[in-house]
């Protein structure tokens, strides 16, 4: 049996994969990718992750990129119901995962970018991101005011996918104070032992 290799840090999009593996108790080797040394652009790494992005996974001769696909693979190979206990729960977990990736995530990560690029966003970009978030986050707030988790009554990978995107708000110090249901849910899901294990 081969050991799964998981490339990428215990933060950002890559944290999703570490968190899911911790929830499942999956054994794997954690492999660092040094962006400063250009390791993510090395030919050998591009064969694993064609966009040169982390996370990436290698399981024997199987290579996989995209954090949500990696989470899905880990869940399926473990035979777990972390993806959702019913067809409806699984579909809702996907709905909120995709909603997050397509709507708040690009704006939250753009606001957080100066932390690692050391280049400030233009005032126009900042304003555009904040306007978009003011449109999208109330939709998640309403969902979590009415349900304990994004897919309904149970914790699923949907919560992991959404929580890892919202974590970018802390890097940019984006003010989330108005979103009381989101904040209570974020505290609840990040209090799980697997989250702390994944963070290392
Ligand atoms: N959609 C991808 C996004 C991954 C992503 O943006 N990874 C960043 C780190 S959080 C990265 O590798 N950036 C390097 C690059 O784009 O060159 C996923 O969810 O896995």
Image (cartoon, rainbow, N blue to C red):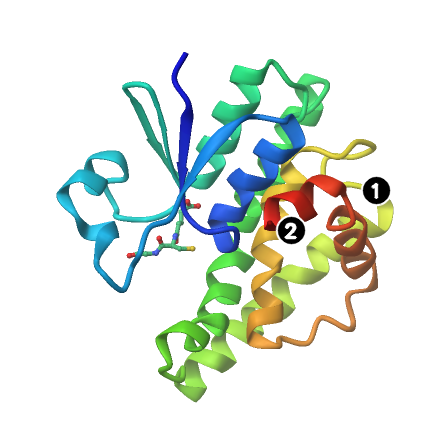
Say if residue 102 shows up in the picture: no
131 in relation to 49, above or below: below
What is the x, y in percent for residue 25?
63, 27
Left or right side of 125 for 181: right
39 in relation to 67, above or below: below
Left or right side of 117 for 10: right
179 in relation to 79, above or below: below
Does the beta carbon at disc 2 come under 8 Å from ligand 1? no
SS at circle 2 = helix
Q: Quadrant of residue 176?
A: bottom right
Q: Badge 2 is on which residue? A: 163
Say if residue 17 shows up in the picture: yes
Q: In which quarter of the image is residue 20?
A: top right
Left or right side of 148 for 37: left
Q: Nearer the viewer, residue 113 or 43?
A: 43
- The residue furthest left is 43
Q: Which residue is drawn at 20% across and 41% down?
A: 46
The quadrant of the picture occupied by the N terminus is top left
Q: Compute the Cα span from label 1 to label 2.
A: 15 Å
What is the x, y in percent for residue 108?
53, 65
Q: Quadrant of residue 22?
A: top right
What is the x, y in percent for residue 116?
40, 72
Does the beta carbon at disc 1 come under 8 Å from ligand 1? no
Q: Residue at x 60, y 50 (%)?
A: 199
Which circle, 1 or 2, is nearer the viewer? 2
Query: Which one is earlier in the sequence, the residue at label 1 or at label 2?
Result: 1
Left or right side of 79 for 116: left
Q: Which of 196 and 63 is in front in this view?
A: 196
Q: Badge 1 is on which residue? A: 147
Q: Residue at x 20, y 35 (%)?
A: 47
């Amino acid at each position: 049996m081969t050991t799964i290799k998981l490339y990428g840090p215990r933060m950002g999009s890559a944290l999703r994969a570490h968190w899911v593996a911790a929830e499942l108790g999956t054994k794997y080797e954690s492999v660092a990718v040094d962006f400063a040394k250009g390791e993510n652009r090395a030919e050998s790494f591009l064969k694993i992750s064609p966009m040169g992005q982390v996370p990436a996974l290698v399981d024997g001769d199987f290579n996989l990129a995209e954090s949500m696909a990696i989470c899905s693979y880990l869940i399926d190979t473990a035979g777990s119901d972390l993806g959702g206990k019913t067809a409806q729960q699984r579909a809702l977990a996907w709905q909120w995962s995709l909603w997050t990736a397509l709507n708040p995530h690009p704006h939250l990560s753009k606001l957080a970018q100066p932390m690692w690029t050391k280049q400030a966003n233009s005032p126009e970009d900042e304003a555009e991101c904040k306007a978009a978030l003011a449109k999208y986050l109330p939709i998640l707030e309403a969902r979590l005011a009415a349900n304990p988790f994004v897919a309904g009554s149970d914790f699923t990978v949907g919560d992991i996918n959404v929580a890892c995107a919202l974590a970018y708000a802390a890097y940019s110090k984006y003010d989330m104070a108005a979103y009381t249901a989101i904040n209570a849910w974020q505290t609840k899901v990040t209090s799980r032992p697997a989250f702390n294990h994944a963070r290392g």
